[in-house]
Amino acid sequence: MYNIFNPTTIKPTGWLRRQLEIQLAGLNGQLDRVWPDVRDSAWIGGDREGWERVPYWLDGFIPLAYMLDDKDAIARAERYIQAILARQQKDGWICPCSKEERAKYDVWSHFLIGKVIAQYCEFTGSIEAEESLYKSMRCLYRLLKKGEVKLFDWGKYRWFECFIPLQFLWERYHEDWILSLARKLKKEGIDYHDYIDTWKTPLNKWVLYTHIVNLVMMLKYEAVSCKLLGGKYKNDADKLWKILEKYNGTAVGSFTGDECLSGIGNNRGTELCSIAELMYSCELLYAITGDKIWADRLEKLAFNALPATISEDMWTHQYLQMVNQIACVRFPGRSFFRTNGSESHMFGLEPHFGCCTANFGQAWPKLIESLFIRDEDGIRLTSMLPAEAVTEVNGARVVVRMDTEYPFRLGCTYTVETDAPVTFTLKIRIPAWAKSASIDGKAVEGDCVIEKEWNGKESFTLTLTDTPHFVERPHNLHVVEYGPLVFSLPIETEYKMYEYERKGVERKFPYCDYEIYPKSEWRYGFANDTFTVTEKEGNDVPFSMSAPRVTVKANLSRVNWDYADGYNTVADKVPRSRNAIGDAEEIELIPYGCAKLRMTEMPIVKKK
């Protein structure tokens, strides 16, 4: 689907496999055992939530289980899928509501469970599940055509998400009703172009057309529509991205949304669901269009925004992250966030709302699924990450393996192994940040394209170069970047744990809630642009705060920087003064994704 390799042929290795192992041992891997909305969901015959949470969870848990080939996890995923299929109604309706309730049931979850079943079929080849998906989408088509169900609320704003399971069906059945359903959904769905002006100034109001998750999903609407229905691709995604970035962009490639668009501000929140879904949109956009800008954007999100907002053991997460985040402490009065509550930036089981609890698990597995892409003339590699894939090209068995510590190191050794001579093109994307690239010492201009006859086992090493450098941010602030990583001033932390029960949901270690208090100074600016990179061994946590695998030493000076007006745990978005207070200090910056408390956007200070 979408020219991506069959996911059963891809296996993570190295630090990337370790990241999935941590995820399986953490909240996403154990959610069906600890969280009532999944454990006792109406999707499997229980009495808890029967809408998006189980599908969201399965969307990450299924690929996680199969990529790790974990028998227990596979059995648990199978139990959920079989329970859902067993409850499908005779006419094909698959969601857990009665016939009388259908008209008021938001069919967004119908789209979502369709994505899940399609993915399950990719991993298992299940004919039973494929037939179930066929029947459920055929049922949706009939009901929409008769007017017995309509698009409203989330379904109306996420109509294009249904194109993913419909594409899966179209590639197997080529029946006209599939395209008719796609056209019907597109006609009833929202046209986001009607709301662009509302993205430019924060509304301080919760509305669906500035909802951050809707908008990051929306970016792929044209690509998936053209893939299924045809038509000229105009690259709307890039135009819409640039508008969102200009008025709501962050230093780590995401957009502010707490929970709706929140403007330019390094102390505004970004919802975790939006990170996971924006990564998925970038993955599909790169796979469909081949435009490398989407892979560059994907990497920035995956290596910075994603790990920063999930605890190292992956048992807790934030609903909202902040680029300059000096504390994760509940606000005693009015929330600082525009449309989210006072606990949204705490780390916990379900801070503010449970959608991210269910949904964040898709991010790492789907990134891995997107690494290998089939082109007409060969294989395209999205990102150099430790993984391998096995495929067939013109009758020959082909294994492509990447051995690398990227993004912590700026190089990769590629191995191609075939069981017979075969000619194909291997395309390796060179990231936009790279100042130079070479293969075994020979310079490469542009992307690396190797067209040849491959025979037996061949290896070569790609080396990229970069130097730490400033990237300018709004309000005359700067961040330090090196390779695909953004670097932050880490703030020493003190955790305060909370175990309690609320609305029948227990928070108990390790899935309890935490406030994080700062224990070191944060009021700094850059004294100069002199930086030193140090590569380190790290530990068994890829994005570890205590043992980062790469650091950048920088010279920083204290500045006069106040709290945001009315709050003593939020830094104002700019300092009161850019004059240095005291002498410059050499301080080690660490990757943004490693730092739970951090200052990232800082000024260049004026000397004493």
Image: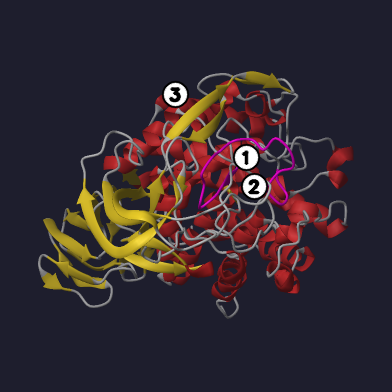
Q: Secondary structure at mark 3?
A: helix
The residue pinned by badge 1 equals 55
Q: Magenta includes 21?
A: no
| Residue closest to the eye, 494 or 451 | 494
Give the CA distance from mark 1 to mark 3.
19 Å
Figure check: 221 above or below 309: below
Q: Which mark is residue 112?
A: 2
Mark 1 to mark 2 CA distance (whole Å): 6 Å
Query: Badge 3, how many Cα within 10 Å: few under 14, some, many 20+?
Result: few
Say whether marks 1 and 2 touch (CB < 8 Å). yes
Residue found 51% across the figure and 53% down from its top: 323
Q: Earlier in the sequence, mark 2 or mark 3?
A: 3
Q: Amino acid at mark 1?
A: Pro
Determine which residue is flagged by label 3: 72
Quadrant for the C terminus in the image: bottom left
Q: Residue 404, image x and y in percent?
A: 23, 50
